[in-house]
Image (spheres, grey):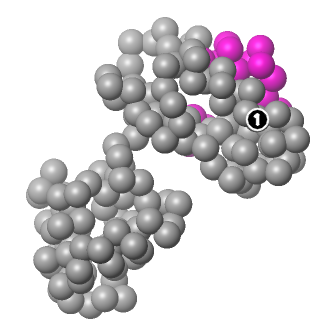
Amino acid sequence: MEETIEKILRKYPAGKKDSLIPLLQDIQREAGHLSDNSILEVSRYMNIPLNKIYGVASFYDQFKFRKKGRYHLQICHGTACHIYRSSLFQAEIEKTLQVKAGQTTKDGRFSLDVVNCLGACSSAPTLFINETPYGNLTLEHLQKILSEIKDTND
Ligand code: FES
């Protein structure tokens, strides 16, 4: 892991503060999250205080501070999805996979995030599992999807 961070850091000139966001994006993409250790390394390399980096990273939804599950579920609560009672879908996911919004299961299989819009409003209500969108979701369809991912050996 440290090698990955080092490799990413070397792509950017030390201390060039304009590079902070692309650098964090690279770490997020490679590692799946920004660990405390990676933020510490960035802070030393870029000579930017830790609290400033946490401040920047917290501002953007794209940055996550915890490792996502192998199945990363994102349920949308934007206006279009909310109309279709997306909170019921969230409750079903939480109950079936035993994971709360903002958390990852202890075995690292499932994580759940609530987001404001997935850019697929015309297919509301919408769920993403990793990069795969599931639109026009019904409770029955959701239960089938959850049952499939729950029963795989991944
Ligand atoms: S509001 Fe849910 S995808 Fe846009």
Asked if residue 47 is positioned above or below residue 91 in the image, the reply reads: below
Q: Position of residue 43 (x, y in %)?
A: 20, 75
Badge 1 marks a residue whose secondary structure is helix
In the image: residue 39, left or right of residue 29: left
In the image: residue 87, left or right of residue 60: right
Q: What residue do we see at 78% from left, 28% from top?
A: 137
User: Magenta span covers which residues?
Assistant: 129-146
Tell me if residue 133 can be seen. no
**Residue 133, magenta (yes or no):** yes
Front residue of 133 and 95? 95
Q: Position of residue 22 (x, y in %)?
A: 38, 75
The amino acid beneath tag 1 is Ser
Q: What residue do we see at 50% from left, 60% from top?
A: 62
Q: What residue do we see at 51% from left, 31% from top?
A: 100
Q: What residue do we see at 45% from left, 28% from top?
A: 110
Q: Quadrant of residue 45?
A: bottom left
Q: Position of residue 140 (x, y in %)?
A: 77, 14
